[in-house]
């Protein structure tokens, strides 16, 4: 299809905005979630059974899911159209997905650090989503991140705040 569009454009006036036109397309299909859903236990569950259920949900991301699978599921869950412009960017030595010109930043790598958190604050997107496992059970770093984003948001109008989420 893109080849046909390019062939039809031969000999026609070329406007500046048409030079960068994306002529590709993606096909998306609805599938099962890439995230395990927590099943609320019954009230009479034993402590051992509860611990087993909790252990099953520690790694709650499907190991067969690609970053693209996770990205598009998170876009839909964040209320963003999957047709929105998405590009990979480098930020503080990390690769992120920038959605709608930095309105939403998504970090799907397995490591996060303070330098990345500071760089995200400098951009100030409306939303920042990262994997919970990227904190590697470093509760101090995760708690600091939550507090830093809360401090950033303090006294700001809702439109100027950053919605920080981990999945």
Image (cartoon, rainbow, N blue to C red):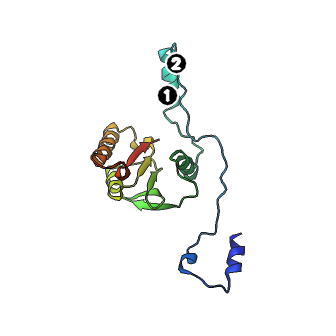
Circle 1: is it few (<14), some (14-19), or many (20+) Cα within 10 Å? Answer: few
In this picture, residue 130 sits left or right of residue 11:
left
Q: Quadrant of residue 91?
A: bottom left
Q: Which mark is residue 49?
A: 2
Residue nearest the observer in this picture, 163 or 3? 163
* Residue at mark 1 to residue at mark 2: CA–CA distance: 10 Å
Q: Secondary structure at mark 2?
A: helix
Look at 53% across and 21% down and name the residue there. Answer: 41
Above-or-below relation of 5 to 81:
below
Whichever of labels 1 and 2 marks the residue nearer the N terminus, that label is: 2
SS under mark 1: helix
Q: Residue 151 in the image: x percent, y percent?
A: 27, 45
* Foreground pick, 105 / 61: 105
The vertical placement of 157 against 60, above or below, is below
Left or right, 53 with respect to 160, comes to right
Q: Are marks 1 and 2 in contact (CB under 8 Å)?
A: no
Q: Where residue 80 sits in the image (x, y, percent)?
A: 53, 51
Query: Within the image, what quadrant is residue 132 found in?
Result: top left
Q: Residue at x 54, y 40 (%)?
A: 61
x 46%, y 50%: residue: 109
Q: Camera-side residue: 141 or 40?
A: 40
Residue located beneath label 1 in the image: 55
Can you tell which quarter of the image residue 32 is in?
Answer: top right
Q: Quick one: quadrant of the N terminus?
A: bottom right
Residue pushed farthest bottom?
A: 11
Q: How many marks?
A: 2
Residue 87 vs residue 127: left or right? Answer: right
Residue at 54% x, 58% y is 84
Rate crowding at label 2 as few (under 14), some (14 to 19) or many (20 or more) other CA atoms within 10 Å.
few
Q: Which mark is residue 6?
A: none
Image coords of residue 17 (percent x, y)? 54, 76
């Amino acid at each position: 299809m893109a080849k046909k569009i390019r062939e039809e454009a031969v000999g026609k006036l070329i406007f500046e905005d048409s030079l960068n036109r994306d002529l590709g397309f993606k096909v998306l299909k609805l599938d099962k979630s890439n995230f395990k859903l927590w099943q609320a236990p019954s009230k009479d569950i034993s402590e051992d059974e509860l611990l087993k259920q909790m252990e099953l949900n520690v790694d709650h991301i499907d190991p067969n899911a690609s970053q693209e699978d996770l990205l598009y599921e998170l876009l839909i869950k964040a209320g963003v159209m999957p047709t929105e412009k998405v590009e990979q960017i480098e930020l503080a030595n990390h690769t992120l997905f920038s959605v709608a010109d930095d309105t939403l930043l998504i970090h799907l790598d397995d490591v996060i650090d303070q330098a990345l958190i500071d760089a995200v604050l400098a951009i100030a997107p409306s939303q920042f989503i990262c994997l919970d496992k990227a904190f590697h059970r470093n509760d101090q770093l995760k708690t600091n991140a939550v507090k830093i984003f809360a401090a950033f948001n303090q006294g700001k109008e809702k439109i100027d705040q950053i919605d920080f989420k981990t999945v």
